[in-house]
Image (cartoon, helix red, strand yellow):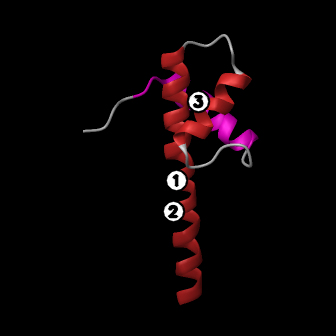
Amino acid sequence: MGSIRPFNVKRTAEELADKFPNVFGDKFEENKKKLEKMMPDVSKRTINMIAGYITRYAVKKKEKAKREIEENSLN
């Protein structure tokens, strides 16, 4: 069963991932360290939630792009 994240975590994560596409990737620990530097006054729990969502968001975007490339190559 998946975890439900608050709207503000999702919104923040998506904004950061879209604003800095080259900074965040599909590795949780790296995303977490980068977030800790960007937002030093945010709680550890919130940083972890945002980093987790950014990681998942990055993986989904990568899979979507891969699927689109495969679909275009079939046509």
Residue 11: percent from the left, percent from the top? 58, 30
Span shown in magenta: 5-20
Residue 24: percent from the left, percent from the top? 66, 43
Residue 17: percent from the left, percent from the top? 66, 41
Q: Going by the image, does 39 lie left or right of 62? A: right
Residue 31: percent from the left, percent from the top? 61, 37
**What amino acid is at disc 3?**
Arg
User: How far apart in space, not on screen, are marks 1 and 3 (Cα)?
Assistant: 17 Å
Name the magenta segment's main secondary structure.
helix
Mark drawn on residue 63: 2
Residue at coordinates 59% horizontally, 82% vertically from top-left?
72
User: How far apart in space, not on screen, are marks 1 and 2 (Cα)?
Assistant: 6 Å
**Residue with the mark numbered 1:** 59
- The answer, for residue 75, to whether it is visible in the render is no
Question: Around disc 1, counting alpha carbons within 10 Å, would you say few (fewer than 14), some (14 to 19), or many (20 or more)?
Answer: some
Q: Earlier in the sequence, mark 3 or mark 2?
A: 3
Contact, mark 1 vs mark 2 (Cβ under 8 Å): yes
Contact, mark 3 vs mark 2 (Cβ under 8 Å): no
Q: Is residue 35 above or below residue 27?
A: above
Circle 1 — which element? helix
User: How far apart in space, not on screen, are marks 3 and 2 (Cα)?
Assistant: 21 Å
The quadrant of the image that shows the N terminus is top left
The quadrant of the image that shows the C terminus is bottom right
- The answer, for residue 37, to whether it is visible in the render is yes
Mark drawn on residue 13: none
Circle 3 — which element? helix
**What amino acid is at disc 2?**
Glu
**Residue with the mark numbered 3:** 11
Query: Foreground: 68 or 30?
Result: 30
